[in-house]
Image: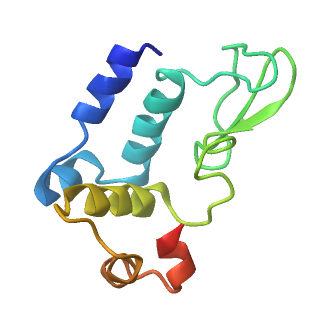
Amino acid sequence: MTQASRDDLWRDFPKTAPEFDTRFATEGDCRAYWMTARWGGEPACQRCQSKRMGRPMRNGTLFACADSGHQTSLTSGTLLEGTRKPLKAWFRAVFEVATHRNGISAKDLQRIMGFGSYETASR
């Protein structure tokens, strides 16, 4: 993905709460955005870079390469690798951090997002 298209993707990120709620209404909307941000919309094998990926598994978050058989997760190798929170929760956290003019404390983010632990909010 070119730098220009990544910049366009970031510029297209919602700037208001209603825009956010419309754009990322479902977990599928978040997966599609993350797939575009990560692979330009088409999954690629981490091992051999092949674009010949099988049908998505595990709710659209896991892909198996038709060439190497290697399985690649939508979040593997990213900041969100290993998370058990839905992508929508992380997208909302990014939105909250990005839209607070003077920043936001991890404690406030924990409260706003309803995260059970401070550690989750401070990641």
Foreground residue among 98 and 51: 98
| Rendered image coloring scheme | rainbow
Q: Residue at x 62, y 61 (%)?
A: 83
Residue 85 position in % (x across, y down)? 54, 66
In this rendering, would 80 be left or right of 58?
A: left
Q: Is residue 110 above or below residue 71?
A: below
Which quarter of the picture shows residue 72?
A: top right
Foreground residue among 87 and 106: 106
Residue 28 position in % (x across, y down)? 43, 46
In this rendering, would 52 be left or right of 3?
A: right
Q: Is residue 35 above or below residue 13?
A: above
In this rendering, would 102 be left or right of 92?
A: left
Residue at the extreme front of the image, as rendered: 102
In this rendering, would 105 be left or right of 81?
A: left
Q: Residue at x 37, y 24 (%)?
A: 6
Q: Quadrant of the C terminus?
A: bottom right
Residue 59 position in % (x across, y down)? 59, 49
Which quarter of the picture shows residue 21?
A: bottom left
Q: Residue at x 30, y 61 (%)?
A: 97
Q: Residue at x 49, y 72 (%)?
A: 122
Residue 17 position in % (x across, y down)? 15, 59
How many badges with numbers are in the image? 0
Q: Is residue 48 above or below residue 25?
A: above
